[in-house]
Image: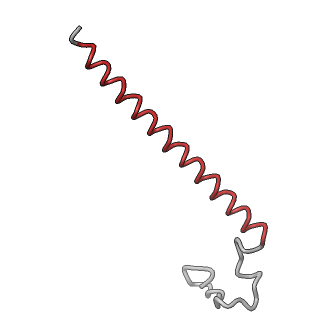
Amino acid sequence: MAHLPLQTIGGGLTESVAQVAVLAGTLVLVLMLVALGAFAYKSLRGDGIRWPDEDAGAEDDVHRGDADDEWDYY
């Protein structure tokens, strides 16, 4: 009979930790879906990935490096 209060406290604590873990997992899943939606939206709207050779007059001043440079574009 002495083990009954320990099981009650331990069971409640275990359930609380499990609920927190499920809540955190749900939050991470929702944030991942929002990030995926934002990436898809930006890609479809044209504000997503831009390649240097597609924008000839870009304001970020991307230029091609020399043959012996470490990077292709600067």
Residue 47 coordinates in the image, percent (x, y): 72, 74
Q: Quadrant of residue 68?
A: bottom right
Q: Residue at x 50, y 41 (%)?
A: 23
Work out whether 7 lies above or below 29. Answer: above
| Horizontal side, residue 41 vs residue 24: left or right | right
Query: Who is closer to the viewer here, 56 or 26?
Result: 26
Which colouring convention does the figure follow? secondary structure
Q: Quadrant of the rendered structure where residue 59 is?
A: bottom right
> Does residue 66 appear to the left or right of 5 in the view shown?
right
The quarter of the image holding the N terminus is: top left
Picture layout, residue 74 above or below residue 33 = below
At horizontal 39% and vertical 35% (from top left) the residue drawn is 17
Q: How many marks?
A: 0
Q: Position of residue 71 (x, y in %)?
A: 57, 79
What percent of the width, then of the height, locates residue 14? Answer: 37, 28
Nearest the viewer among 14 and 9 is 9
Q: Position of residue 63 (x, y in %)?
A: 65, 89
Relative height, residue 52 to residue 48 (above, below): below
